[in-house]
Image: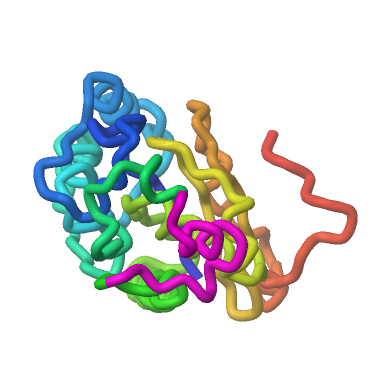
């Protein structure tokens, strides 16, 4: 199967504002986020991308704009990768939400959390994982097992995908950190996903590209974990 680069959108005007923006309109990248978006061109220079998919929200579109322009790519828009629908919590100050009984559920038992007037976190994971596997299968069918594609989405959405890839229950997903403009990388196989990067804000990503198979290599072994660990990339 292909390899997916999970990119959280760059820093937005809502990050650090103390407000749960959710799907609010007009949330753009701030100056720092614009610099992060521009830096993606160099960060991903060594990675050939066979497809780019994004959330429909503006901050994801702006994050991908410099990279898409440099590569001549037109990102696909996928509603299943949209931000969590926080319902009645959307636009509220986080300090006011801390007193809500649901806040502790979101932190400690997210699989049981349903936002009033919105969706459940279990539903978020279901839609996101279903979509990421469908797009991965699409890219694999079109470009082969060594293909790499990129998904630009939101923190909780990416965390839910990573929890699934790590074989963790959704109740553990709050242990995962996904910063703005960070990259996490998952390679799916027929038997299990492999998590190659997690919350990576560095500059070197060439190692996520699958190597050419060696002569006579058993492709059925591609889904097996190396005993003792990998040998790395020279």
Q: Position of residue 83 (x, y in %)?
A: 29, 58
Residue at screen point 22% across, 66% down: 78
**Vertical side of 49 occupied by 189: above or below:** below
Please state, as top left, top right, bottom left or bottom right, where the C terminus lies in the image: top right
Which quadrant would residue 26 be assigned to in this image?
Answer: top left
**Vertical side of 102 occupied by 18: above or below:** above
Q: Nearer the viewer, residue 122 or 43?
A: 122
Q: Is residue 174 visible?
A: yes
Magenta stretch, overall SS: helix
Residue at screen point 36% across, 76% down: 127
Residue at screen point 54% across, 46% down: 208
Q: Nearer the viewer, residue 189 or 143?
A: 189
Return the residue found at the far left.
Answer: 26
Q: Is residue 58 magenta?
A: no
Side (left or right) of 5 relative to 65: right
Return the residue found at the far right.
Answer: 228
Q: Which residues are magenta?
A: 99-116
Side (left or right) of 206 relative to 29: right
Q: Position of residue 114 (x, y in %)?
A: 40, 73
Q: Position of residue 111 (x, y in %)?
A: 53, 73
Q: Nearer the viewer, residue 100 or 16?
A: 100
Side (left or right) of 194 relative to 157: right
């Amino acid at each position: 199967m292909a390899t997916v680069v999970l990119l959280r959108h760059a820093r937005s005007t809502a990050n650090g504002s103390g407000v749960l923006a959710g799907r609010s309109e007009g949330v753009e990248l701030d100056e720092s986020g614009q610099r992060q978006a521009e830096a993606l061109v160099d960060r991903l220079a060594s990675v050939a991308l066979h497809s780019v998919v994004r959330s429909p929200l503006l901050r994801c579109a702006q994050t991908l704009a410099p990279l898409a322009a440099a590569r001549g790519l037109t990102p696909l828009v996928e509603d299943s990768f949209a931000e969590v629908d926080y319902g009645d919590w959307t636009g509220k100050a986080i300090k006011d939400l801390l007193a809500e009984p649901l806040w502790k559920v979101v932190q400690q038992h997210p699989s049981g959390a349903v936002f009033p007037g919105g969706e459940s976190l279990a539903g978020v994971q279901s839609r996101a994982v279903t979509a990421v596997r469908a797009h991965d299968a699409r890219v694999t069918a079109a470009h082969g097992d060594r293909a790499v594609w990129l998904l630009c989405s939101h923190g909780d959405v990416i965390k839910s995908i990573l929890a699934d890839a790590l074989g963790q229950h959704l109740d553990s997903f709050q242990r995962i950190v996904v910063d703005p403009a960070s990259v996490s990388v998952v390679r799916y196989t027929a038997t299990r996903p492999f998590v190659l990067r997690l919350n990576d804000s560095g500059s070197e990503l060439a190692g996520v590209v699958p190597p050419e198979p060696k002569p006579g290599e058993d492709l059925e072994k591609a889904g097996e974990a190396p005993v003792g660990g990998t040998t790395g990339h020279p």
